[in-house]
Image (cartoon, rainbow, N blue to C red):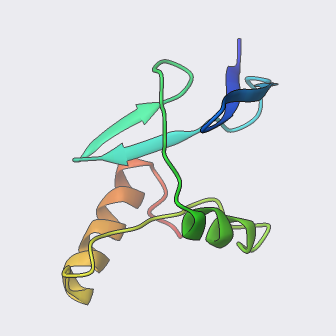
Amino acid sequence: MGTNHYLCDQHGCVGSAFTDRRVRRMRVVANNTVSDAEHQFIAIELSEADKQNIANMDPEATLYMCWPDYMSKKASGAKIRQAKNLLGRNDE
């Protein structure tokens, strides 16, 4: 078992891909809840800036996070640590 990925734009879904279960699947943390694409449907709307940021990520990087402008550095740092903890990635 694996996960299906559909690439969609304003004109509809333009392609699909299947990810083998041995490959790390997409997981999303929102409101202190982890959603796993192997067990749940996940849809993420990316802005042009998001797409550019992801395209420019280091090849080894696997976490992309964003937060409101008004959130303090201390609060965003706490949320980052919390998200990593929920994903079992506290060692990073």
The residue lying at 80 percent from left, 67 percent from top is: 59
Point out residue 27 in the picture as x, y percentages from the top left corner.
50, 40
- Comparing 29 with 49, the one in front is 49
Q: How many marks?
A: 0
| Side of 8 where 59 appears, left or right | right
The residue lying at 40 percent from left, 67 percent from top is: 66
Height in image: 31 above or below 83?
A: above
The residue lying at 67 percent from left, 70 percent from top is: 52
Height in image: 62 above or below 29?
A: below
Point out residue 29 in the picture as x, y percentages from the top left corner.
37, 47
The image quadrant of residue 20 is: top right
Point out residue 22 in the picture as x, y percentages from the top left corner.
77, 28
The residue lying at 21 percent from left, 86 percent from top is: 74
Q: Of all residues shown, which one is farthest toward the bottom? A: 73
Height in image: 6 above or below 45?
A: above
- Comparing 92 with 80, the one in front is 80
The image quadrant of residue 50 is: bottom right
| Side of 63 where 3 appears, left or right | right
The image quadrant of residue 21 is: top right
Quarter in which the N terminus is drawn? top right
| Side of 47 where 68 appears, left or right | left
Q: Of all residues shown, which one is farthest toward the front? A: 11
Point out residue 35 in the picture as x, y percentages from the top left corner.
40, 33
| Side of 30 where 24 appears, left or right | right
